Image: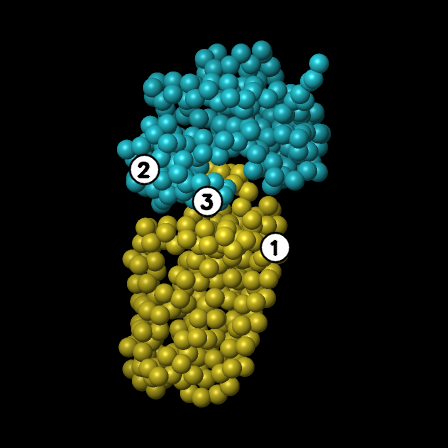
Chain colours: A cyan, B yellow
Amino acid sequence: MDETPPVVILRDAVVLINGFPLLSGIDLDLDAGSLVVVTGANGAGKTSLLRLLGGLVTLSSGAGVVSGIDLKHGDLRELRRRVGWLGHEGSFYDDLTARENLTFAAKALGRPTDEIGRVLERVGLSARTSTVAKQLSAGQRRRLGLAWLLLRRPETWLLDEPYASLDDQGRTFFDDLIAEVVRGGATVVVSAHDPLRSTALSPRTLTLAGGHVVGDVS
Amino acid sequence: MIRVALLVAGKDLRIERRSRVLLWQVLPFGVTALVLCGLALGPTHAGHSSAAPGLFYLVMLLVALLMINRAQVIESSPGTRASIATLGLDPAGVFLGKALALAVELWLTGLVVLAGSVLFLHTALSGTLEAVPSVAVTLAALAAAGTLYGALSGGGQGPATLLPILSLPAFAPLLIAGERSFSSSLHGGSLWRWWLISLVALAAYLAIGILLYGVLEES
């Protein structure tokens, strides 16, 4: 039987910033088309884990492969092209409109810009295409971040606290979209402060504390 | 690389046009600084004219520090940095684009400050017009060097004092060459020699930026 290797493999992964360990001894396997929710208190290492998976911080020791790229010796720039990032702080230029942000991303990726209208409609922002990003509400900004990802269609989606400041309708919208993306074969890693999101979203929950994995429940 | 450069430059200029920081903050600051410099020199017209090239570049240096910081700050939010990193843009293109946008902003500000030097410091109009090409080259070199030092000083995330401390020693030769060529345009002298120094500095900073901007971004 043909076995596809996991999209994410971490073995005893350690991330140090200025000598301080943000992550220690992390072991993780994720298959293509899987969804994992990473939970933990503030400072537990959720964002650092996502940043490691996206090639946005370097692996200090241990071993890791994401999308076939070695985290220690591989081309991290190429890895970043294969992942999509949605941060809780906003993921775009505040002084550009929703459409201008997506046009910039599409042109940077060499993609046609005629998909932008469809993507904005998909995330419910078709009435706000000409609104400057900083004038969008927190929920709308999060939807714009999703539109950015839908336009890119990355192999791995890294969503850092996407539920922060969202109302119930927004959370349901995100849940539905994440489920759709996973069904499409993408790997999704979501960090969520609220452990309840893990039960709503995923059969697998990774719990972090002090940069260590303290729970991995499937 | 050129495609990315034009994309980044267009984005930076669009953000600048929309935020109107250049129009409502930087230009008034530049003109006010020039007028204050003129007031500090006293009422003698001749003294103003001879000091005008140096004062012009002093004001442009202060303006450049503001604009360099601003150009880096628009990229500095952690979410924006992460998202842009996942676009995999060619760092050489990003450097060229940011330097081009900064150069355009400095050229626009420079034109206004030059007009201010004719009005308030009584520089000769013909000599000032003759200086425009050398001013354009010197400001472009300042933009290239500034983009490099902006990234080196933490890309808008470092302490505010780091950029001037790091960049002022590097800017000094540019200011001397610029001031000398502007003075030569006004009062006669070896204009081309000083202009050539600015041109060589521009080429050197562009080459260094194209080669090293990716390393600075990563660090």
Q: Quadrant of residue B114?
A: bottom left
Residue kind at label 1, given as amino acid type: Leu
Is B172 positioned to the left or the right of A104 in the image?
right
Given residues B43 and A212, the one toward you in this image is A212
The chain carrying label 2 is A
Please, what secondary structure does the residue beneath circle 2 have? loop
Amino acid on which the number 3 mark rests in the picture: Lys
Residue on which disc 3 sits? A107
Q: Whole-Å distance between the Cαs marked 3 and 2?
A: 17 Å
Establish whether labels 2 and 1 are both on one chain: no
Task: Judge depth for marks 2 and 1 and give the one in front.
Answer: 2
- The image shows residue A164 at horizontal and vertical percentages of 41, 25
Residue at disc 3, secondary structure:
helix
Which circle marks residue B44 in the picture? none
Direction bottom: furthest residue: B188
Q: Nearer the viewer, residue A7 or B82?
A: A7
Residue A129 is labelled as 2
Which class describes the residues within 10 Å of circle 1: few (<14), some (14-19), or many (20+)?
A: some
Q: Is residue A160 left or right of residue B39?
A: right
Helix, strand or loop for disc 1: helix
Q: Residues within 10 Å of mark 3 (few under 14, many from 20)?
A: some
Q: Mark 1 sits on what residue? A: B212
Q: Residue at x 46, y 59 (%)?
A: B100
Q: Which is more N-terminal, label 2 or label 3?
A: 3
